[in-house]
Image (tube, helix red, strand yellow):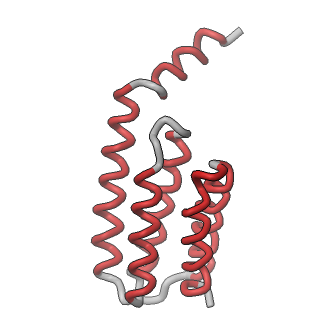
Amino acid sequence: MNTGSTHISNAITDSPGAIANLAQHMANVTNTVTQQIDGSAASEQVKTLIKQLTDQIAALSPSLVPEKIKQMGDNLIALSAEMTKPAPRRKWYLLLLDGMKETALALGEMGKPIIDTIAMLSPLLVP
């Protein structure tokens, strides 16, 4: 029986420190993505949508599913890093956007704005 370890794990995940760490992580995501996007050759429309997506993910409540929010933030950093390359790999765009969309779908109604933004962004990145 691992009920004790599950309880400890949940207590750590749900603690104020975990929420603070997630907020710090998302602040880092926002700064990193903004720097990468500003330095990319992407269109202004793409830059606007990436920044909107960043804000939407950062605005999610850390009490929802912290590991999922962190995962979306990490995917966003990878997406913006790919955009700065001289020859971005379009398949990476698809993989990262699909990962974020799947996570947003699992969030239900709270994930809908993220899904909508990804729907606008996808055809611009992967024509």
Q: Which image quadrant: the C terminus?
A: bottom right
Q: Residue 58: which quarter of the image?
A: bottom left
Q: Residue 119: which quarter of the image?
A: bottom right
Q: Is residue 106 left or right of residue 18?
A: right
Report the front residue among 75 and 110.
Answer: 110
Report the front residue among 92 and 116.
Answer: 116
Report the front residue among 65 and 40.
Answer: 65
Q: Which image quadrant: the N terminus?
A: top right
Where is residue 90 shown, x and y percent of the image? 58, 82
Q: How many marks?
A: 0
Q: Is residue 76 above or below residue 80?
A: above
Where is residue 78 shown, x and y percent of the image? 46, 66
Residue at the spot 60% in from the left edge and 70% down from the top edge: 116
Q: Is residue 66 left or right of residue 104?
A: left
Where is residue 120 shown, x and y percent of the image? 57, 79
Residue at the spot 35% in from the left edge and 67% down from the top edge: 33
Residue at the spot 42% in from the left edge and 63% down from the top edge: 54
Report the front residue among 41 and 124.
Answer: 124
Q: Residue lying furthest front in this view? A: 109
Where is residue 27 shown, x and y percent of the image? 31, 52
Q: Is residue 83 above or below residue 86?
A: above
